[in-house]
Image (tube, rainbow, N blue to C red):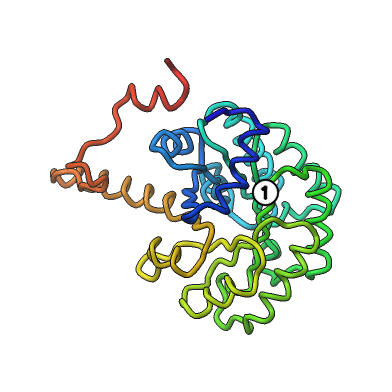
Amino acid sequence: MSTSPEYATFHFHALHHADRPLLLPNAWDVASAAALAGAGYAAVGTTSLGVASAHGWPDGRGLTEVREATLALARRLNGRLPCPYTVDIESGYAGDAAQVAAIAGELAECGAAGLNLEDGLPGGAGLQDPVRQAELISAAKERAPGLFLNARVDTHWRVDAPPPLSATLSRAESYLAAGADGIFVPGVVADADVSVLVAEIPAPLNILFAPGRHTVSRLAELGVRRISTGSLLFRTALQAMLGAAEAIGSERELPDVTGTGGEVLGYEDVQRLAGEE
């Protein structure tokens, strides 16, 4: 496919209305994004936890340092991937409407096809006022109307007692009215809840893949249009690293975490991911 920003954005929107849901793996640096794109995934997203942690900062705190690392990654991905990419900007890094709009504008300029904006407040301080969140969404869409803005509703994310689905639906309605292109509700796992969200939200629904609770085929049957891996791949990579180091120290065979008989990417393979011909 063409890698022009205009076509990438058009294609990314279309992927949310295809016959099967968009399975969106989430990368944390150029090498992981290039590897996923090279493996044939239709699009790649970034993971805020992965980007923040890889740079030595906590996720979800609205830190300027994480914002800069995220934008730097977005710039580095420009022109490197054969597929569209979308960027997770947490809740806008504690910015006001003008600052969130500026981030959206920069992402559009550097070739991103979408962005993810959550309504969970930095540091786990509850949820953003939906009217205020709608203002952030509206400002971002006004500055970068072509980006696919995925509005994340955190009513069910990392909470012990989520509110009724009606609260989620109310927020989704407000965010779509403000210009959001899709709705992301992480933390929802029950088929019945997913079905209600699909039926009541007049836009592509994004669900965070929950190992042991979800399958791609079942989420497709329920009508989910986008399935994100979030930080799962990053956390799996860290665990695989620890397992390999422990095996070496214990003089055991390396664990077959790749499913390829223990083979791993070679030095030259990673050099190619970094852009060396």
Farthest residue, direction front: 19
Horizontal side of residue 112 vs 257, given as left or right: right
Horizontal side of residue 58 vs 20, given as left or right: right
Bin the neighbour count of mark 1 within 10 Å (Cα to Cα): few under 14, some 14-19, many 20 and up.
Answer: many
Q: Is residue 226 above or below residue 162?
A: above
Q: Which residue lies at the image location 79% right of the left edge and 49% below the top edge? A: 140
- Residue under label 1: 148
Q: Which residue lies at the image location 59% right of the left edge and 80% below the top edge? A: 162
Q: Which residue lies at the image location 57% right of the left edge and 78% below the top edge? A: 196
Q: Is residue 113 above or below residue 219?
A: above
Quadrant (top left/top right/bottom left/bottom right) for the C terminus: top left
Residue 247 seen anywhere in this rendered image of the structure: yes
- Residue 169 in picture, x, y percent from top left: 68, 75
Farthest residue, direction left: 252
Residue 229 seen anywhere in this rendered image of the structure: no
In the image shown, does 249 or 146 lie closer to the viewer?
A: 146
- Residue 43 in picture, x, y percent from top left: 51, 42
Amino acid bearing label 1:
Phe
